[in-house]
Image (spheres, rainbow, N blue to C red):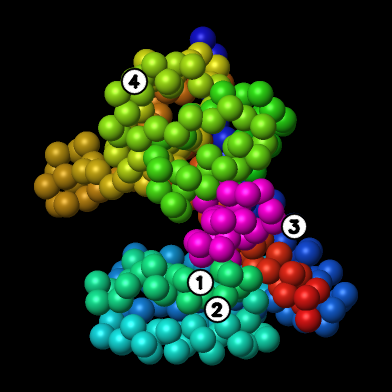
Amino acid sequence: MTEAIIIDGKEFSSNLRNKIAEDVKAFKKERSIVPGLAVVLVGEDPASRIYVRKKEEMTTAVGMNSLSYRLDANASQQELLDLIGTLNHDPAVHGILVQLPLPKHIDTPTILEAIDPDKDVDGFHVVNAGRLAIGTPSLVPCTPAGCMMLLEHTLGSLKGKNALVIGRSTIVGRPMAQLLLAADCTVTIAHRHTKNLEELCQQADIVVAAVGIPHFVKASWLKPGAVVIDVGINRVPVEDETAKAAGKTRIVGDVDFVEAAKVASAITPVPGGVGPMTIACLLNNTVQAARNLTSAS
């Protein structure tokens, strides 16, 4: 059997960012406004700092204003809420992102619900979740939005496809299922405790794996010719014993990529598949939010 097409998220996201840059340029000319994305980081988590820096660099690269806010790890929940309140009322800010995870003394749902839904470019606010659920325009969580772009680019119309989403988080699994339903797929949501998971996989034309377990989905589970979107980002020890002893790790997905690529018709790699799409979709949401907010004013 022919090896699967590798769905290149790096190339797709690069093209998307180029399009966003053109949209930003047109938006500036049309309304004399520069879309602004405010990113709030609480504490000094190394992974979060790297991710925030990437977001800020890409925001600037597409011509938008990047507004950075840093709070000490010991900052109180009220300090963070006060900052969000200020950003909610700042007309130069069109998108607000609070980098997760937050320190343990801060209640994450309280913080996310404090963000103005129309500036919630992560798409996590309960209002945006509700809008998505009933099919009205909303700011969609970035990772599922990126997955949909890759699926539609690969398959064209998704109408009538059997889609299986493995994972039920409010960040990926549930919104992913809503988006697939909106695209006229027949959708099943499963998780690590689903008893007949292998059987469900074998019936699926589309498999989206977002369960957070390395190589959880086996090639033998897949229907020949299925399209596989691997959202997982898992760190595991490297295979080389010397490097393993030094504590070195590598990133793998939720799907056994090497074997699955022999069965699927198309598959995303990890890294280089879904990951690059997340920041690109964040930028896309910011432009959308800017258009919505300035149209309403």
Q: Which amino acid does label 4 sit on?
A: Asn
Bounds of the magenta span? Answer: 121-144
Q: What residue would you read off at disc 1?
A: 97
Q: Where is residue 121 shown, x and y percent of the image? A: 58, 66
268 or 107: nearer the eye?
A: 107
- Name the residue beneath numbered marker 4: 196
Tag 3 or tag 4, which sits nearer the N-term? 3
- The answer to whether the residue labelled 3 contacts the one labelled 2, judged by CB atoms less than 8 Å apart, is no
Which residue was labeled with disc 2?
Answer: 38
Residue 132 percent coordinates (x, y)? 60, 52
- Residue 19: name its quadrant: bottom right
Taking depth in this image into account, of 242 and 78 the one nearest to the observer is: 78
Task: State which mark lies toward you, 3 or 2.
Answer: 2
Question: Looking at the picture, which amino acid does disc 3 mark?
Answer: Lys
Q: Which of marks 2 and 4 is nearer the N terminus?
A: 2
Name the disc covering residue 19, or none.
3
Q: How far apart are marks 1 and 2 (CA)?
A: 6 Å
The reply to whether callout 1 and callout 2 are in contact (CB within 8 Å) is yes
Between disc 2 and disc 4, the foreground one is 4
- The residue positioned farthest toward the top in the image shown: 1
Q: In this view, does 85 lie above or below 262?
A: below
Asked if residue 145 is positioned above or below residue 62 in the image, the reply reads above
Compare marks 1 and 4 and give the one earlier in the sequence: 1
What is the spatial separation of the Cα atoms under label 2 and label 4, in whole angstroms? 44 Å
Residue 268 lies in the magenta stretch: no
- Residue at 43% across, 21% down: 201
- Secondary structure at badge 1 equals strand
